[in-house]
Each structure stands twice: as structure tokens, then as C-alpha cells.
Image: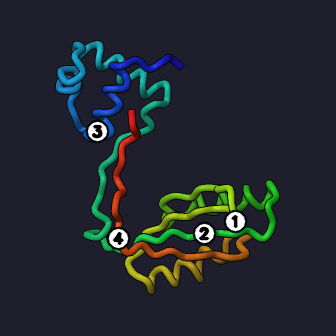
């Protein structure tokens, strides 16, 4: 992997805000030629700094108005239980994010559902049936204060 210079960091900062910017416009904004910018862009992708491109969708308009965070405590903290839980969560489209954390519980799960009734079904039918789950704590989001932050390059 190569070191990032100021041009690479500027390219990444711009792409975090506008992933649809053309290579020509990106080149103008960073002060390089389109050819050089395109080469840097390909290198940043190849080296894994850019992991993908996608559209940001409005979850409310699509029927996923309730954002919920769930603390998950496992019954045992063994590699086997961790692996089984992690694999099960990876296969669940309802789970937007899942993070193993240090502290009073094992995982923090982020999910979006239509409403509280949908969340109740998700919790009872899916989450509590995952391997090793002993206990959960639910935090329904009342207001999203900040949810779309680029990395501070």
C-alpha cells in the first residue's frame, strides 16, 4: 500500500461527499490532470481505500422509519459463540451494522424497520433466536441528529 499524499486525501474527501463526480471535475477540483486523477482513483480502489460506491436512500420514504440500536449480550464469550453469532448477523438483511464492542455487552446492532410492531417481530422472531443471545437492550431513536458524516481527512 502506498502512502496518501495531499492529492489522494483531497480526492477521498471529495468522493465522500459526491461519489458521482466525474473524473474531469474531480481533476479540476484537486488540481491534477484527468489522466493522473484517474490513475490515482484506480490505485485508491485497488489499495482498498475506496471500498465501493452507492446511493444514499431516504429510509422514511422507503418505509423504514424506525431506527433502532440493540445491545446484545451473549451467554458465553467463546470464539465459537462469537463466530456463530457474527455469521448469522452477516446473513441478515435487517441488520444494517453490527459491532463487537468492549464493555458491559458484546455487540451493538443497528437496524431499520417500519415501526415498533415490525421491530417487535424482528426482535422476537429473529434477533433473540440467534446463536448465543442471552439478553438484549433496545434503544429506539427519537431523532437523528447527525447521521451522514465523512471521515475527517
Q: Quadrant of residue 15?
A: top left
Asked if the residues shown at circle 3 and circle 1 are in contact, with their CB atoms under 8 angstroms apart, the answer is: no
Q: Secondary structure at mark 1?
A: loop
Name the quadrant of the N terminus.
Answer: top right
State the CA–CA distance, disc 1 to disc 2: 9 Å
Q: Residues within 10 Å of mark 2 (few under 14, many from 20)?
A: many
Asked if the residues shown at circle 2 and circle 4 are in contact, with their CB atoms under 8 angstroms apart, the answer is: no
For this view, does 34 lie left or right of residue 52? left
Mark 2 or 3, closer to the camera: 2
Mark 1 or 2, closer to the camera: 1
Task: Report the residue marked by disc 1.
Answer: 104
Give the percent coordinates (x, y) of residue 98: 57, 58
Residue drawn at the location 36% of the way across and 43% of the way down: 150
Among numbered discs 3 and 1, the one appearing first in the sequence: 3
Q: Quadrant of residue 52?
A: top left
Q: Quadrant of residue 131?
A: bottom right
Q: Secondary structure at mark 3?
A: loop
Q: Secondary structure at mark 2?
A: strand
Among numbered discs 2 and 4, the one appearing first in the sequence: 2
Among numbered discs 1 and 2, the one appearing first in the sequence: 2
Mark 2 or 4, closer to the camera: 4
For this view, does 96 lie left or right of residue 106? left
Q: Of residues 125 and 17, which is closer to you in this image?
A: 17
State the CA–CA distance, disc 1 to disc 4: 25 Å
Amino acid at each position: 500500500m502506498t502512502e496518501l499524499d495531499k492529492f489522494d486525501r483531497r480526492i477521498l474527501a471529495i468522493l465522500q461527499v459526491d461519489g458521482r463526480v466525474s473524473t474531469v471535475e474531480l481533476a479540476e477540483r484537486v488540481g491534477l490532470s484527468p489522466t493522473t486523477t484517474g490513475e490515482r482513483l484506480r490505485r485508491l480502489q485497488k489499495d482498498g481505500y475506496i471500498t465501493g460506491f452507492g446511493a444514499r436512500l431516504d429510509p422514511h420514504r422507503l418505509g423504514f422509519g424506525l431506527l433502532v440500536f440493540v445491545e446484545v449480550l451473549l451467554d458465553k464469550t467463546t470464539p465459537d459463540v462469537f463466530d456463530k453469532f457474527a455469521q448469522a448477523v452477516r446473513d441478515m438483511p435487517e441488520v444494517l451494522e453490527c459491532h463487537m464492542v468492549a464493555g458491559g455487552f458484546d455487540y451493538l446492532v443497528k437496524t431499520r424497520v417500519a415501526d415498533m410492531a415490525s421491530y417487535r417481530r424482528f426482535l422476537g422472531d429473529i434477533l433473540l433466536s440467534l446463536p448465543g443471545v442471552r439478553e438484549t437492550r433496545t434503544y429506539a431513536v427519537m431523532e437523528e441528529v447527525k447521521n451522514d458524516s465523512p471521515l475527517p481527512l
